[in-house]
Image: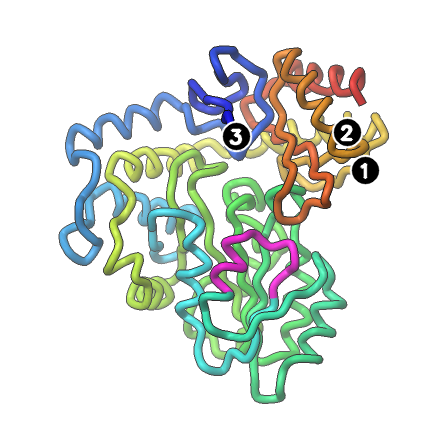
Amino acid sequence: MTMPLMQSPPGAYTKIDGREYLYFVGTGYLGLQGHPEVIRAACRAAELYGIGSANSRTAFGTTPPLLEVERRAAALFGLDDAFYFASGWLGNHVLMQLLDAQAGLILLDEYSHYSVFEAARASGYPNATFRHGDPADLQAKLQQHLKPSQSAVVLSDGVFAATGRVAPVREYHDILRDFPGSILCLDDAHGLAVLGENGRGTFEYAGLWGQGVNVVGNADCCPHLCFSGTLSKAVGGFGGIIPGDQEFVRRVKLRSPHFGGASPPPAPIAAATARAIELVMAEPGLRTRLWSNVRLLKDGLRGMGFDVDQTPVPIVCLTPGDAENMQRIQRELMQRGIAVAYMAAYCGLGHEGGLRIAVFATHTEAMIQQLLDELRRLV
């Protein structure tokens, strides 16, 4: 199987297999992966610290860039501290280490990311699913499966990777208030730095940030709210992140083998990521520009008859016809110098797959209009 070869950083224009394309693929929503200051930070750190620490965090593997990522991530979220680790995929595993014996059941949105299901199964707790984005079914499953003395953990993506749908976490929160000790936990890989006034993700977008996210010590808080994120998408760096208050992060690090027994992100990657977080915080206009581009794209698609939502999520999934037709559209767009993704199979997609379009802050209005014009000719 031949895979397309990316030959430049992902951005509004990206070189693939020797040709430059107008690029609406992937997860580089703020366009920071190729930012010159991010690249320079990685180069300087490589000269200072080498490529990898060849050790775990607790055995001489902690470098200044790692601490800088955690400091800047804590500042981004307005919290005390953060734990930075090698991959966002691992975030759900890390959080599941915090579960106590009272958790009687883990309930997962049926379209949650593969990493969410993997972490739930590895936890050793009973698992069940509820219908995608369906608060009523979640409530029914809680009533069906939980004993009076038990609490539940509800796991979901904050933003679903293939479709861009935002989980109805406000409704989930209200339902879980009737189940003391329960936890609402999000994989917020696609919400971080995209949603919310400060870019803090789905909980902030839903108006729940003030309810105590990733904190310990509020016994009256029900449900408890927690999340993990990745720094490899909108932020433009790499690795997983779990911010929190001091005690929450202390417990996360204490219980996670990814702190004491695994290699941390390499110093050059950490330095680049720290600089990228700094840019996210210093330039909120990146996010507002992204939201403006999202509106332009979605308004144009609605004008063509597509049923797309009105959220600021920079992901759109179109399903015009069957798999053969969608593959045809993708091929013809590529021939016209525009790259979008046809996803044959992914969590949340039907058996025909879908055309996934991602818009970036670095796209211009003319670029988005070019995409819309070509789609109008092809669908």
What secondary structure is marked by label 3? helix
Instruction: Tell me where residue 271 appears, x and y as whole percent.
Output: 28, 36
Of the numbered discs 1 and 2, the one sitting upstream in the chain is 2
Tell me which segment is drawn in magenta. Answer: 108-120
Separation (CA) of disc 2 from disc 3: 20 Å
Instruction: Tell me where residue 39 appears, x and y as whole percent.
Output: 33, 25
Q: Which residue is mark 2?
A: 299
Q: Which residue is mark 1?
A: 307
What secondary structure is marked by label 1? loop
Tell me: 327 left or right of 13: right
- Give the amino acid type for the residue marked by disc 2 in the picture: Asp
Q: Quadrant of residue 82?
A: bottom left
Of the numbered discs 2 and 3, the one sitting upstream in the chain is 3
Does the CB distance between marks 1 and 2 fall below 8 Å? no
Q: How many marks?
A: 3
**x 52%, y 43%: residue:** 199
**x 48%, y 38%: residue:** 233
**x 75%, y 20%: residue:** 375
